[in-house]
Amino acid sequence: AQSVTQLGSHVSVSEGALVLLRCNYSSSVPPYLFWYVQYPNQGLQLLLKYTSAATLVKGINGFEAEFKKSETSFHLTKPSAHMSDAAEYFCAVSDFRNTPLVFGKGTRLSVIA
Amino acid sequence: EAEVAQSPRYKITEKSQAVAFWCDPISGHATLYWYRQILGQGPELLVQFQDESVVDDSQLPKDRFSAERLKGVDSTLKIQPAELGDSAMYLCASRDPIGTSGSGELFFGEGSRLTVL
């Protein structure tokens, strides 16, 4: 069964600092991996996705993630945090054969001025 | 830009009452999901539809929850009777078709937040 583990339920960074949100996955087949962002009382918005093409994936709002098969990781990064990045971030995995996404528990990102 | 529509955005009800949530997916998306998201947690799948058929409802508490997608387009999720533990955000998502023309990603609605008193 597929699963994802997000390390750290809450991450706090200073404005302008590097953002690193960690995600490790478990899958019996080559996975498809996603990062979603959720602002308070809103639905989830796709940041980026890995679908077996390039291992370094660039997404919206300056975020990127690198798929590392040897580490079963798909960590999300952004070089310089902005106040508007404060939100909840979810990593998700699917085997893409029309199966549902399985989500991690989420990491809340706080950005300090 | 096409969106997944959900209503109501907010619902407050007393326990033992019935509640219903509606979802209209993006046109052309045959696959529709209902997820439940408890505060502070990630979304968890309740039910998956392919057109009008239920593909997976193994996590749906069938004694009180029901879901339908009669014409394979919009969908309704019902809870009867509601319990205190049902307080959560109910998210509907539709999936971009897999294949050369689609990315397979999920598009989410804004959600329906349920508070059971």
Image: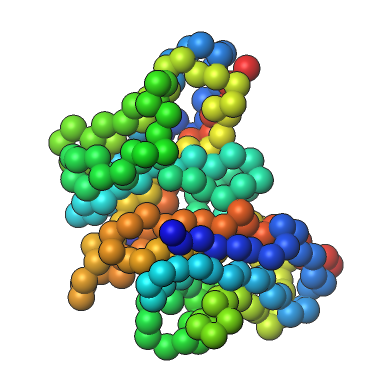
- Horizontal side of A109 relative to A113 (left or right) equals left
**Quarter occupied by residue A105:** bottom right
Q: Residue at x 49, y 46 (%)?
A: B44
Image color mode: rainbow
Q: Residue at x 58, y 43 (%)?
A: A41
- Horizontal side of A3 relative to B79 (left or right) equals right
A46 up-or-down from B5: above or below: below
A76 up-or-down from B97: above or below: below
> Foreground residue, A17 or A55?
A55
* Spot occupied by residue B103 in the image (x, y as percentages of width and height): 31, 70
- Looking at the figure, which quarter contains the N terminus of chain B? bottom left
- Looking at the figure, which quarter contains the C terminus of chain B? top right
B60 up-or-down from A54: above or below: above
* Spot occupied by residue B12 in the image (x, y as percentages of width and height): 56, 21
- Horizontal side of A47 relative to B77 (left or right) equals right
Q: Residue at x 51, y 60 (%)?
A: A3
